[in-house]
Image: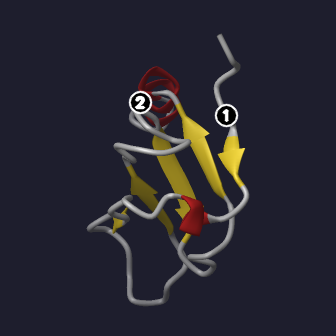
Amino acid sequence: MSAMPRHVPSSTDLPAAHWVRSSYSTGANNCVETARPLTGPGAGLLAVRDSKSPAGPALLFSPESWADFTAAFQS
């Protein structure tokens, strides 16, 4: 079994991804966007990218890792 990818060099490598922003984001374009790619290198993972660089790299997280990360901000 191959190792889980940690990132993709360009968000355009996830063509079927539907990127969304938090409803708390402002129009200043200084936030992150997330997507759950259904196909390709990030299938089944959560992709995260910088909204200022939509064609830039995306980090890929397992659903469990992302839940652990975001839980740290909820306490």
The disc label shown at residue 75, or none: 2
Apparent side of residue 24 relative to residue 70 in the rendered image (left or right): left
Rendered location of residue 47, percent (x, y): 50, 49
Q: Most extreme residue toward the bottom, as rendered? A: 28
- Please state, as top left, top right, bottom left or bottom right, where the N terminus lies in the image: top right
Apparent side of residue 20 relative to residue 13 in the rendered image (left or right): left
The disc label shown at residue 25, or none: none
- The residue that mark 1 highlights is 5
Apparent side of residue 50 relative to residue 25 in the rendered image (left or right): right
Residue in front for this viewpoint, 5 or 69: 5
Q: For residue 64, which quarter of the picture?
A: top left
Q: Residue at x 67, y 71 (%)?
A: 56
Rendered location of residue 63, percent (x, y): 42, 28
- Mark 2–mark 1 Cα distance, whole angstroms, equals 29 Å
Q: Residue at x 33, y 65 (%)?
A: 20
Residue in front for this viewpoint, 3 or 27: 3
Find numbered disc 1 in the image and state the secondary structure of the residue it sits on: loop
Mark 2 residue type: Ser
Judge whether 3 appears above or below 57 on screen: above
